[in-house]
Amino acid sequence: MAPPPPCAISLCLFLLLTMAAASATQAAAAEAAAPCSTTTTESTSSSSFLRARCATTRYPEVCYDSLLPYASTFQTSHVKLAVAAADVAAAHLRAFSARVKDMLLHRGGGSEEAAASSGGGAARVDAALHDCASTISAAANLAKRSSAELTRLDADTAASTETSTSGGSRQARWQLSNAKTWLSAAMTNEGTCSDGFEEAGAAATASPAGKEVAAGVASVTQHTSNALALVNGIPL
């Protein structure tokens, strides 16, 4: 029998190589797709968890929109979600406090003495701004303390689970109580800021500074309220 022509051999080799390359490409594609699929599943799970938890808050849309960027940090953990919420509240409070201080600075205030010496309605506005900057700054610190306590709660709960340490539940309840107390105190401070303008009179409340502060308090209160609701929803 005559041997096959060289061209037939070359064609067979080409087809074999092509099939092998296609198989390798498909295997590589499947391997690359697997982590992506896992990541997508985790992301969907985190967002669904966040949506469900935010539904328990007073401002669910604000809750969801502000915390979604941090979904990878809390995934489906109630405590880690509360930590993120307290951190977001603290960040908004710090920004608002800085804005109030800036308003006071540009009005020529910045101290009680300056406010007292400016006279009339302007003095009352300056005094209200000064008090507001102080109380909102304190509120930011309280929200941050709450976040730190929740972070300790998360770590202690994990350690307690691994070692089956007795007394962990009592400690967890104490830490949770602290976090609630400090967020509640932060909300009280936010109300104190608003009250300062109301006590200064209608002219102070209706002033540009009074209107901006009222809007700012309304905004930060939403984040602090949401954080407190998420802390209240932590199961122990």
Image (cartoon, helix red, strand yellow):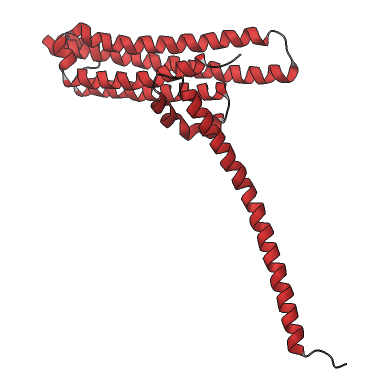
Is 142 on the left-hand or right-hand side of 45?
A: left
Image location (x, y in percent) of residue 20: 72, 68
Rendered-image quadrant of the C terminus: top right
* Residue 10 in view (yes/no): yes
Q: Quadrant of residue 235?
A: top right
Is 64 on the left-hand or right-hand side of 22?
A: left
> How many tags in the picture?
0
Rendered-image quadrant of the N terminus: bottom right
* Residue 119 in view (yes/no): no
User: Is 213 rendered above or below residue 175?
Assistant: below
Residue drawn at the location 49% of the way across and 11% of the way down: 180
User: Is 231 rendered above or below residue 72?
Assistant: above
Residue drawn at the location 76% of the way across and 89% of the way down: 6
Image location (x, y in percent) of residue 51: 48, 29
Question: Quick one: which residue is furthest to the front in this view?
Answer: 1
Q: Quadrant of residue 26?
A: bottom right
Residue placed most toward the observer, 173 or 54: 54
Residue placed most toward the observer, 162 or 25: 25
Question: Quick one: which residue is furthest to the right in this view?
Answer: 1
Image location (x, y in percent) of residue 52: 50, 26
Residue placed most toward the observer, 131 or 154: 154
Residue drawn at the location 35% of the way across and 25% of the way down: 95
Image location (x, y in percent) of residue 19: 71, 70
Q: Quadrant of residue 216?
A: top left
